[in-house]
Amino acid sequence: MQQLKLALKLLRRDLRAGELSLLIFALLIAVGSTAAITLFSDRMTRSMSNQASEFLAADLAIAGANPIPPAWLDQAGTLGLKQAQVTEFNSMLLENNEMLLASVKAVSAYYPLRGSLKIAGADGLSQIKIQHGPEPGSVWVEQRVLTALGLELGASLTIGEQTLRISRILLYEPDKRSTFYNFAPRVLMHQQDLAATAVIQPGSHVQYVFQFSGEPLALSSFEDSLKTQLKPGQRLMDIHTDRPELGAALQRTSQYLGLSSVVVVLIAGVAIAMSAQRYSERHFNTAALWRCMGYPQNAMLRLFVYQFLLLGILCSVAGCGLGWLAQQGLFWVLADLLPAELAAPGLMAYAAGFITGMVILLGFALPPLLRLGRVPPLRVLRRELSPLPNSARLVYGLALSLMAALIWRYTADLKLTALILGSGALALLVLSGLIWVFLSLVSRLFLRMNLQWRFGLRGLLRNRQGSISQILAFGITLTALALSSVVRNDMLNNWLKQLPADAPNYFALNIFPEQVNQVQDYLQQAGINSNRFYPVVRGRLTAINTEPVQQRVVKDSQGEAATQRELSLTWSDSLPADNQVVAGGVWQADQPGQVSIEQKLAESLKILPGDRLSFSIGGSEVSAIVVNIRTVQWDTMRPNFYMIFSPGTLTDFPSTFITSFYVAEHLKPALNGLLKQFPATTLLELDMILAQFKTMLHQVTTAINLLLCFAVLAGLMVLFATVYASLDQRLYEAALLRTLGASRRFLRRAQLIEFLLLGSLAGLLAALASELIIYALYSQLLHMAYQPNFRLWASLPAIGAVLVSLPGLWGAREAVNQSPLAVLKRQ
């Protein structure tokens, strides 16, 4: 207890003296970043687990492109399960000469079985929870529908051939998902009114969801019996598999943010290690004096360890509070992608942030601190006598173990953890080597420069290891910021630049075969040139050469994405002009039973010409021989398909037609007449989808940039730690130069040159790393045309110079402002 009291007293003294300020800030940044991601992931996991039934609006659901057999509903009724039905589809709405693509959802009387809907109150501001959907003859709509179509509550809304009354403003659905059907604003109607709309016809793109709730044993029995009866294209969802698309997206987001926080921890850890090193060096004399007075070595070491443990507890608690604020910011910027009600964070999430803070402190600060236990008493008389350095293995071993543990925690994959550590270490080694070579080349020009540049460069060359650490820290931070900005913009801008001026901006879907000629004539009369009309049949790939397709699927591959859903299949007597055959024979339109497959899907599933593919279409099995493999240009904004069959293969199945066309702004009113004449046709306005996509990209990158603010602060802590680590030497050198006649202006210019060079080098390093990463992303993952971004080479060095020079000059100001006499007296 006496040692703890003494440690607390010494800690208060060091805090008042500012000895631990940088270490505290670096630790707060590291803990805050880690705690933010931990709390974010924990709240999402708890929300998905605790409220899964509400998100599903039921205990169990069956989703698919076709209704389920009536026998299944009878079986559910026998088991005493409550039932509800949901039908989702897109439809164009036309009111007041305005048109809007809406996501229509028809629900039965007992929807929702779990959770509640939320509608606007009479005042338009309050929210009302309600356990049922709209009455027959009425619809509930989101506010966006009223605004876009110029309608008010009580007005009439026509869906297909049925006119309904708008009775409520819809605010929230428990089972709303981020799918194809939800790009557009929601319209909620009663299931009884669906048939009268005449929108759903054979071949229409519709999603059917049958929901069930009841006792756990009855649900389990019903689920077990269905697993063996599910048809291709049908998906069984319960509280464990609910919201798979949201869960996968959030899992990847959490992993990415988690790995980003590891970078923050690494950068902040460098600042902690440098601050602890300076702290220990400044306490060498104190430790030597205590040793001379008979204080035991182990007791003295425990005293300093107690101080850091107390400091770690306080900073970890404060860091958890900072992390809580940061995760609130993450939830705010991602509000449109997340459930409306979120679970509170668990105690284990706070514990994880607290433990991480303590481990970071011990992992990076303990090695320099251990040197205080090796201070010889003779240092009281011989100031140059320093304790022996710790083994580098201890320092790097603790840091590497900490990084590996954090990466494994976010990836849960040992191979991926090893790959990240190995590639990261190699990249740091290569970049460090480049910086070392550059500094070596600069040192050869040292004598040819003027005096101010010599003193500025001397600050970088004097401690090359510290300079390399600073350049790497800022370079990595600037690289992350550049990537989040450039990739987001290029994904849209580069794509739009590649499109011709008359690239199609509308897709027309659900055109029935008997309407094709009429739609063509209407478009021609309106002065709109359409692309080719393709028939579409929905089907699912089930086998390759009698081998189930699931046995060839690789996780997270294009093949997995294509086989987990129904594909749009078509047939044609010729391949599209922009499709190029890369393997196989010539397309033979007069032979049914042939299929052409897109190249990347064929590579993912290891399909070769001559293989036999089996498909499930409307409960029937169809097979075809792969005649060739072709490339597809997906960004042409024309209808494209994974599979194109020869004529006669799919003609027995119900189909609809699809086409695309460009509509100039002055011709868009003509589309209103098209929808009036063909109400079942759906028009997809690509400008609307692009706007939604831009919003989603903006939200995700804003969340990422919020976390990267921690990285910027951590990089600044590295800069300050390096400046303060050399502050005593800077003070002494500045005092000597002032004594020899150097002015304050001369010293400030030398410091400015040093920090400008440091920031510029970090910016050049970030530009090089960004270009290499962008090239790899564009060529290997995004399949976009790569073009050197010269703005990065101009902007990043300037940004780095400003970010480094301003705080650097502020941190080193004491070396210029102090009196030379006072400094020399202390020596």
Image (cartoon, helix red, strand yellow):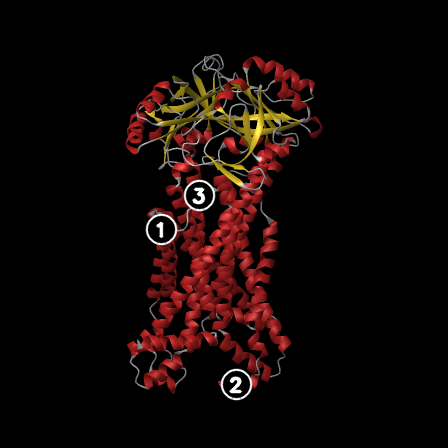
Q: Position of residue 66 (x, y in %)?
A: 43, 22
Q: Position of residue 808 (x, y in %)?
A: 56, 68
Looking at the image, which residue is at 56% across and 82% down?
Answer: 735
Amino acid identity at mark 2: Leu
Give the alpha-carbon distance from disc 3 to disc 1, as whole Å: 18 Å
Q: Position of residue 182 (x, y in %)?
A: 52, 33
* Residue 250, numbered circle: 3
Look at the picture and state if 803 lies above or below 216: below
Q: Residues within 10 Å of mark 2 (few under 14, many from 20)?
A: some
| Res. 220 in view | yes
Mark toward the start of the polypeptide (3 vs 2)? 3
Q: Position of residue 395 (x, y in %)?
A: 36, 65
Residue on which the image places disc 2: 824
Q: Residues within 10 Å of mark 1 (few under 14, many from 20)?
A: some
Residue on which the image places disc 1: 408
Report the front residue among 206 and 56.
Answer: 56
Apparent side of residue 69 relative to residue 160 in the rendered image (left or right)? left
Name the front one of labels 3 and 2: 3
Apparent side of residue 606 relative to residue 634 in the rendered image (left or right)? left
